[in-house]
Structure formats: structure tokens, C-alpha cells
Amino acid sequence: MTVQHSPVSLPAPSTPGARRALPLLRRTLCAASLALLLAAGPAAAVAGGVEWPAAKNTAAQVEKAGLTMLDTEQLAMHIHTTLEVFADGEQVTVPADIGIDRSGPAPRYSPLHTHDETGTIHVESAEWRDFTLGQLLTEWGTPREDTRFGAPLAWVDGRLWTGDADDIVFRDGETITLRYTSR
């Protein structure tokens, strides 16, 4: 069986029909693009071959970060910061479940964790204190420098951070951007 495809025929741009057809075509193309990305799965979120998944040994990484696992999320301190990570200009996905141990019958939480891949960092603690990017990166198990990249440049709310990125303290509503560049 042969399937014949006919070219899409749109009215001339100056006609009222074109003004209605173009948004429909854009929505169709956007939906098709989204379907292709979703079908590609998690690999589509990998930037230039850079993938830093969440550490498998969550409790050990949380302890290494100087934090303690909790049986429930605590809300005496409850803030959210956004983390964006780029490698050679391509966005790297901040993985879900950094700081969440789902290996037992019920999840256990670090006061510093992610729930999804949006880059939202949840600070949910029984006490109000400073939590740092360095602690999160330790929990994540991501390298401060890997063989392809040097240490990242960091920005906080669009302002270049001149100190060590590990020392950035999470503040509610801020956006932290890390940019790694090939050596």
C-alpha cells in the first residue's frame, strides 16, 4: 500500500484564512515537536553528552554534605531556589530526587532536596539556617570539576558570583546559574 502525501496548502498571508491557519499550523508543529521529545525519553535532556544523574547512595551523600536524613519533610524553614546548570551552553537537567532516599518502605528526606527535574531546590528544615550550593552538589554527587570541564562560573539572580560557588547560600526565590565550559 502506498501512502501519498500532499503538500500543505495555506491561504496567502494577507487573507483572513491565513491568519487562522498559521496559528493552527504552529500549534500542530509544537505538539509534534513535544511528542518527539517525549518519545526520546530522558536522553533528550542530556546536554552535549553531559549527564549527571542523582547519586544512588543518597544517605551517604547527605551525610557527606553534613546533613541528616529526616523521616518527614520539616517546614520550620521552607524556601525554594531555582538552579540552572549549563555545560558548553547546553542546559543540563537537575535530576529529581537529589536528597531523597526511596530505598526503604517510606521515603526519607534531606532538608535540601529536589522532587522533580525543574531545577527547583527545596529547603525544608526543622531549623532556620544556611544551606549551601556546595551541600546540594555533594548530595547530587556531581563533580565540581570533571575531566571535560573546569570549575563553573556562577551567577546569583543574574549577578556574577566572585567567590567559591560552593559557598552560595540558598535564598527564597533566587535563581542560581552554573556555567561549565570545556577545558
Image (tube, grey):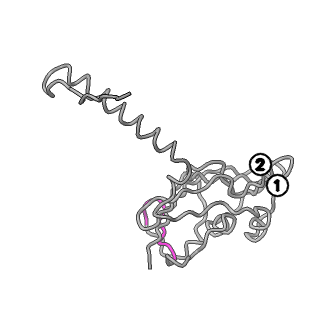
Q: Could you tell me residue 38's position as x and y percent?
A: 51, 42
**Residue at position x 86%, y 47% from top?**
105
Classify residue 69 by image quadrant: bottom right
Q: Could you tell me residue 137's position as x and y percent?
A: 63, 67
Q: Which mark is residue 85?
A: none
Disc 1 marks a residue whose amino acid type is: Leu
Whether residue 141 is in magenta: the answer is no
Most extreme residue toward the top, as rendered? 16
Question: Which image quarter holds the N terminus?
Answer: top left
At numbered mark 1, what does the secondary structure look like: helix, strand or loop? Answer: loop
Q: Is residue 85 left or right of residue 27?
A: right
Report which residue position mark 2 lands on.
Answer: 73
Q: Which mark is residue 70?
A: 1
Question: Which image quarter holds the C terminus?
Answer: bottom left
In the depicted structure, whether residue 124 falls above or below residue 10:
below
Which residue range is magenta in the image?
151-159
Q: Number of callouts in the render? A: 2
Q: Nearer the viewer, residue 163 or 34?
A: 34
Q: Nearer the viewer, residue 35 or 70?
A: 35
In the depicted structure, whether residue 87 falls above or below residue 73:
below
Q: Could you tell me residue 133's position as x and y percent?
A: 61, 66
Most extreme residue toward the right, as rendered? 105
**Residue at position x 79%, y 63% from top?**
59
